[in-house]
Image: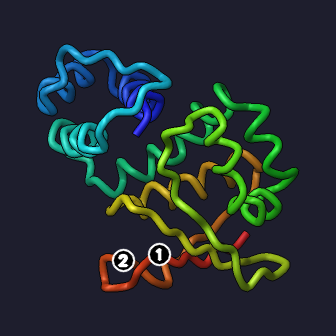
Amino acid sequence: MYGVVNQAIEGMVLENFGTEIWEKIKEKSQLMEVEFLNNEPYPDKITYDLVLAANEVTQIPVPDILQGFGEYWILNTGLKKYGSLMKSGGDNFKDFIVNLPNFHSRVMLMYPKLTPPSFIVDNIQDNSLELSYFSDRPGLKDFVIGLLRGLGKMFDTHVHIELLQERDKGASHEIFKVSF
């Protein structure tokens, strides 16, 4: 993952827990000397290790950390660093999600070595839709839930997310029913 992801984890921890906890997380994940560069790719293991270390240090369950990080990513990293890109995704929550399958093609212009997830939107109704999430990276469904919640907050829209299918139970991808 790119350094911007790890920078965002650092920002979330610093904002919510302070420098002392961030230093403990870096120590626990054996990253004491690392300074993440925004546009540089890093092994995925570093990001996973940071999340696991955050779990150990804060005692917050990993799913809660990932969901919180998803919200933080949208409301802080996304809007502050990529505001015009985020706003180009749609004028409301539903439009943004319907346009999501094309979103990462624009992101790849900035991060050419990106291995993005892909999304398929089905069963679009007035107040709900189904979102299929495909990724080479395991264990990030809670991050996607956090992203969806963050997008709901960004658009001032109440969002309810139901997991209909998950890879952890033998499927090839996750499917979320998203009501708004």
Vertical relation: 45 (above or below) 20 = below
Q: Is residue 132 left or right of residue 13?
A: right
Dot placed on the residue nearer the N-terminal end, 2 or 1: 2
* Distance of label 2 from label 1 (alpha carbons): 6 Å
Q: What kind of element bears circle 1?
A: strand
Return the x and y of residue 149 as percentages of the image width and height: 59, 55
Vertical relation: 155 (above or below) 49 = below
Instruction: Identify the residue at horizontal 80%, vertical 41% (top origin).
Output: 87
Q: Name the residue that disc number 1 marks.
A: 174
Return the x and y of residue 111 as percentages of the image width and height: 56, 35
The numbered mark at residue 92 is: none
Q: Name the residue that disc number 2 marks.
A: 167
Vertical relation: 11 (above or below) 62 = above
Any part of residue 16 in sight:
no
Return the x and y of residue 30 as percentages of the image width and height: 12, 27
How packed is label 2: few (under 14 Cα within 10 Å), some, or many (20 or more)? some
Color scheme of the displayed model = rainbow
Instruction: Identify the residue at horizontal 77%, vertical 66% (top origin).
Output: 98
Amino acid beneath label 1: Glu
Q: Is residue 3 left or right of residue 80?
A: left
How packed is label 1: few (under 14 Cα within 10 Å), some, or many (20 or more)? many
Pick the residue in front: 20 or 123: 123
Instruction: Identify the residue at horizontal 45%, vertical 30% (top origin).
Output: 8
